[in-house]
Amino acid sequence: MNNVTPWYEQAGPQSDTVISSRIRLARNLSNRKFPNRLSDTELQEVSEKLAERFFAANEHMRDEFTDVQISELSEEEGKAYVEKHLISDELLERPTASRVLLSKDRHISIMLGEEDHMRIQSMRAGLDLLTAYEEAVQIARIFEEMTPIAWHDDYGFLTACPTNTGTGLRASLMVHLPLLTDAKLIPQTIQSLQKLGLTVRGAYGEGSKAQGAIYQISNQMTLGFSEEDLIADLSRVTAQVLAREKDLRAKTYESQPLLMEDKVYRALALLRNSRRMSSDEAMNLISDVRLGVDLGMITDVEPRTLNQLMSNVGKASVADRFHVDGGKLTGQEARARYIRETLAAVADDLPEETTDNDKQDSDKRSTE
Amino acid sequence: MILCENCFEREASFHIQQTIQGNKQQLHLCQECARELGYSSGQGTSFLFNPQSGGGSGLFNISNLWSQLFGVPPEELSQLFQFGQSPGMTAGGFQDAVSQTTCENCGMSMKDFAATALLGCPQCYTSFKESMDSLLKRVQAGNRHMGRRLQGTEPVDMAFAEADGNEMATDANDWQQQLQALQEQQEAAVDKEDYEEAARIRDAIRALKQAREDKHE
């Protein structure tokens, strides 16, 4: 699997706190039951037909997008896609029935056969919701012109779950909030945001863990607002949270520069020199280094390198990329080496797949 | 006489005891508000949504839906609700939940919906319009769509023609003919003073023109 996600190349607006913006639009066919009422075979037909329609829209689509059937992915590949936020966990549940259409640079992913027939996702680096929305709507229009879409004059675009109906829009911002996290202000922030119609959860890590102080802030409601208003609300409220984070950063750096520098440089040293590392530790260290880069303490690591690391150090991503089939140690070893090599390399010469020699070496070591 | 805590107009006939985040609370509702807010009447601890696990997508899974509706996660719900009814209270409650209404198209019932928080097909929104109106008012910012509209379409109708026969007009002649036909229809509608129909056709014309534009960009 291609491990480079080129859309991360740009840091994007407000990249010192906003890592990425994501827009998701849900759509369904008007003349089919929702996926939860379709058999695997029926759903497979729907997904296939939708993919056909999409590619029939114009000749360029086949060049721009890859059609990936979930059943063709190994378990690790599938989970790696989830880690990279290209698909959801749920899409993996019915592998024979679902597929995903991925744009070349991976910034658009169209899930077919998930909870709704179509789930269109567009991602942009930094704070850039409107552009992401424009791109998602363009894709939605293609489906709307090529297929009959479930629509109600009162309720808008119809979805399987009423909590998505109307605009079918989920707008999210992936934000980095290390100082709010350290100051234990996150729970209170989540509460305030909930009152304002936004939900917050950890962007990485399972359950309530928020690995690397990275959170996803999204709109809760999808009906009763225009898309522009939903996006404006999300941006405006998140901006307040970001301002708070930046304020804390500035104040803390001013009052305890040595403490912050030590933390940041230790993190960089560990990433550059460790021989084994868990994904938890990696994400947290990357977070510390990112803070150092944002504050100008570290100048020889680029944000895009950190983005690249972040998207490749997950458990499944490492297992898939390095064909790790040994125990945990081999995965940790591979992760540590990938990070060392990435940080040591010049941006243009990033290593892709490991060579066969590498694989043999790590196989040998795991049997010793 | 205790007034309903939701509307403050009618007498409360539902007295509900619940524990939210460790605090015991009493909730007094009139019949209409109880129905609107999703509390059904009945014996013992019957309630509208059966909090069984299942369904729903990651972020908006059933436990979030529950939390939004009732303030507590589903696992705690069954332990917390205790219903008391005023004497002389007739069984009212949520019509669709109590009745045997099923969707004509997919056969889903409100009980099914309550188990998974997922509807069965687009037609369900019409089959259960009353329930949807009040549910959406509760969990969304309103129950009327304020956003982008689907170009030139009729409301959800399961007899809606399959798109199979309607290939996108790629030929200039075809497109012109289609446009002309639509324009004639529009004139006829205006003559009849059927302005709603005229507006629908106007949207269809817009869509046709937009599609043409997009194709030539």
Image: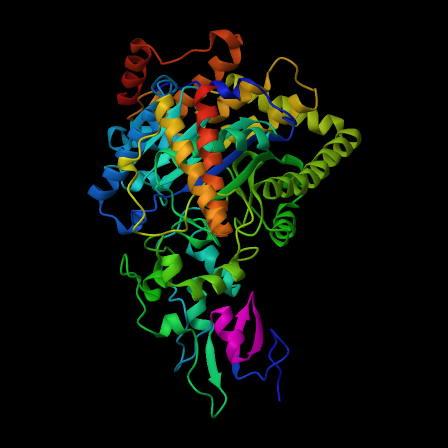
Among the 4 quarters of the image, the one containing residue A58? top left
Quarter of the picture holding the C terminus of chain A: top left
| Left or right relative to B88: residue A173 | right
Residue, far bottom: B88
Q: Residue furthest left?
A: A41
- Where residue A27 sits, quadrant-wise, is top left
* Vertical comparison of B5 with B22: above or below: below
Identify which residue, A148 or A164, lies in the foreground.
A148
Residue A85 appears in the figure: no
Residue A360 higher or lower than A33, as above or below:
above
In the image, what residue occupies the spot 59% across and 82% down?
A: B10
Q: Residue at x 54, y 49 (%)?
A: A220
The x and y percentages for residue A338 are 44, 17
Residue A264: in sight, yes or no? Answer: yes
Q: Is residue B180 above or below residue B38?
A: above
- Residue B86 among those drawn in magenta: no
What percent of the width, then of the height, locates residue A221? Answer: 54, 50
The residue stretch that appears in magenta: B16-38
Q: Quadrant of the N terminus of chain A?
A: top left
Relative to A276, does residue A116 appear above or below in the rendering? Answer: below
Residue B165 placement: quadrant: top left
Query: Residue A178 in the image: x percent, y percent?
Result: 63, 35
B28 magenta-colored: yes
**B52 or A61, nearer to the observer:** A61
Q: Residue at x 76, y 31 (%)?
A: A250
